[in-house]
Amino acid sequence: MVTYLDHAATTPVRPEVAEAMLPWLTGRYGNPSGGHAVARAARQAVEEARDELADALGCQPRELVFTSGGTESDNLAVAGVGGTVACSAFEHHAVLDAVRALGGSTIPVTPAGVVDVNAVPTDADLVSVMLVNNEIGTIQPVGEVAARARGLVHTDAVQALPWLDVATLAAAAHLVSVSAHKIGGPQGVGALVVREGVRLTPLLRGGGQERERRSGTHNVAGVVGFAAAVRACRAQRPDVAGLRDRLSDGLLAAIPGCQASVERVGTVPGILSLLLDVESEALLVLLDRAGVCASAASSCASGAMEPSHVLGALGLPVGGSLRLSLGWTSTDADVDHALEVIPAAVAQLREKVYR
Amino acid sequence: MKVLVAMSGGVDSSVAAALLLDAGHEVTGCTMRLWGGQSDTGCCSVADVDDARRVAQQLGIPHYVFDFGDDFTAGVVEPYVAAHAAGRTPNPCIECNRTVKFDRLWRRADALGFDAVATGHHARVVEEGGRWRLRRAVDAAKDQSYVLHMLDQATLARTLLPVGDLPKAEVRDRAAALGLRTAAKPDSQDVCFITKGGRESFLSTRLALTPGRVVDTAGAEVGQVAAVQLVTIGQRKGLGLAGGAEPRYVLDVEGDTVTVGSHDELLVDQVDLTDVTWVDRPVDGAVLVQCSAHGEPRPATVAGGVVRFDSPSPRVAPGQSIVLYVGDEVAGGGLAG
């Protein structure tokens, strides 16, 4: 049995999503940019999906640009606006590295895991602050950031989409990134909301799709799946707050010295970040061998773990952390299994390390 | 047994994993990420991790990446630079085995509940009468027992070196028969963390390289070197000497002065041994002495921290590892003083 507690990395595809995509992987096809009947049918599928996503994200359909995922959306937002850019110090690398590539600056975050709004620069062309942090789950005051910033505001709402009303919380942002595979949709499809009037230089040039903002033949099945995932998620958000609380309380009680990275208040229900005095790398191997899939910080290209820049930004120790993230498939049995395996694994490592 | 096999992304450790599976062990692969430099070559590049991971997939075993970069920097790279700064000749592969591969990795394996750790080194671990022996590989040309001389009884008891019993050609044949992508991969060469720019470019950003003058044994200046820190005892080339004459070798490096002399002048009767470790009990008496990774073993007598060569031998650069063999068995080793 595998207990999957890494929903913040990716989620299993929901059955209704697979069902919606299947026709576009089997009988139906078509390049939405064409002019004939087959193309028109594909175009219709894309535009119906766009309408649905635009409604969920609180934008006009013409303001929604389909992309290959969160990373492309983030890069398009940052590089597409360009100029003087700044982002919070604990952004996902898709934003952080894009900002660094432009010589941009970072905005400090408080030990509580919230961006320091008073430090938001007022002279930047673009300020990017994520709506929910992917490692610790804290919700960021994007509205307050937008109220202070003079230029454009981008928010990476990838980790917010499963849990929060992005349309409302990101209403003040000019650019909003989302991704399908964090909400039970397929990998390889995302979107960027680009509000009317925002001038964007495209990353990809070619056929001029997406109103010249993102060239490339549409991923029709992916886009259809994204819309189906959003529909399912809006109809019933994953109800994991109770599971998360039981998991968190259980681990904090069972593992002496274990601490939550941040207070539970102000975080989304799906992400739990813990600080431990054992090496994350070793702990994750033991958990994996016991059938518990979890993570710590982000992985680098080789698969080795990088020290968490998120915990570092909070001024926390970066060596021993554990991120457990829940989602639409999470069950009581998952929590039971995790509560059995994780304290035992930590105890094993402590015994060996401190012997 | 539960075995953790260190997979470098090369053919030897790939086949080591396959042999352990054949032997019925529960095998898990891992690749150590040691040097995070900008280069994508050397022993822990992304490409090599990819190769190791793909081989693990093909063999159907789990694979993990362990980042031991902090220990590698502190235990291998920094001492390497410091040794050059002090005019010594370091052997970073041996220090890596001592401080990272056969220490940190073994502790990690222990913490994770593995019974043994395996690598793709060409050498043999044999148990005899309750004691562990470290022997040269079957393939003498590929023997790596020299770089493993620091292993002690406790470590050897939990060490498996499955390819040490095979000629290299057979290792490659096995990999090819299994369809592993590493089958034809070239053997690793040189120091893994030093890549394109070479030793000089690596060291020049980490210590002050200063010019030196080259003198003969009478004290007459006969040449110059750009970086005295890169000169090694026994070195023959790159000394700015006029050609045509009898070959001259570095006899000594003192401050900014490099003394050169004839081959006869290079020869010495003995060398001091420091930082000695023994595979089992300390050995006194007749041994074979190997002073570089692929050097010729020379008959000698060891006693009280001094190696006395049976016949005059080229002097050994301070800092070089000297490994003592009895027959084809490693007795121990240390550093040239």
Image (cartoon, helix red, strand yellow):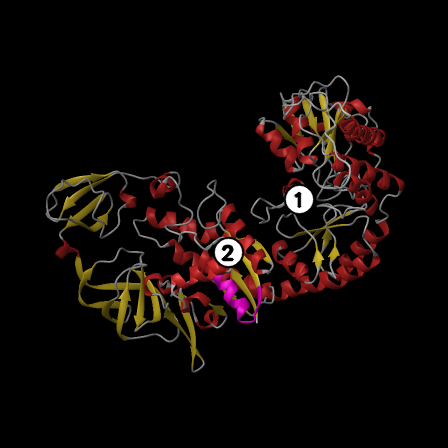
Dot 2: within a 10 Å radius of its alpha carbon, few (fewer than 14), some, or many (20 or more) residues?
A: many
Report the number of numbered marks: 2
- A208 relative to A155, above or below: above
The amino acid sitting under disc 1 is Leu
Res. A221 visible in picture: yes
The amino acid sitting under disc 2 is Leu
- Label 2: state its secondary structure: loop
Between B254 and B237, which is closer to the camera in this rendering?
B237
Looking at the image, which residue is at 13% across and 52% down?
B262
Left or right: B151 with respect to B272?
A: right
- B79 relative to B227, above or below: below
Question: In the rendered image, which quarter contains the C terminus of chain B?
Answer: bottom left
Query: Which residue is the site of mark 2?
Result: B180
- B304 relative to A86, above or below: below
Query: Which residue is the site of mark 1?
Result: A311
Look at the image and give the residue range highlighted in magenta.
B15-27
Please state the horizontal and vertical placement of residue B72, each as a whole percent of the image: 47, 52
Question: Is-magenta flag for residue B20?
Answer: yes
- Label 1: state its secondary structure: helix
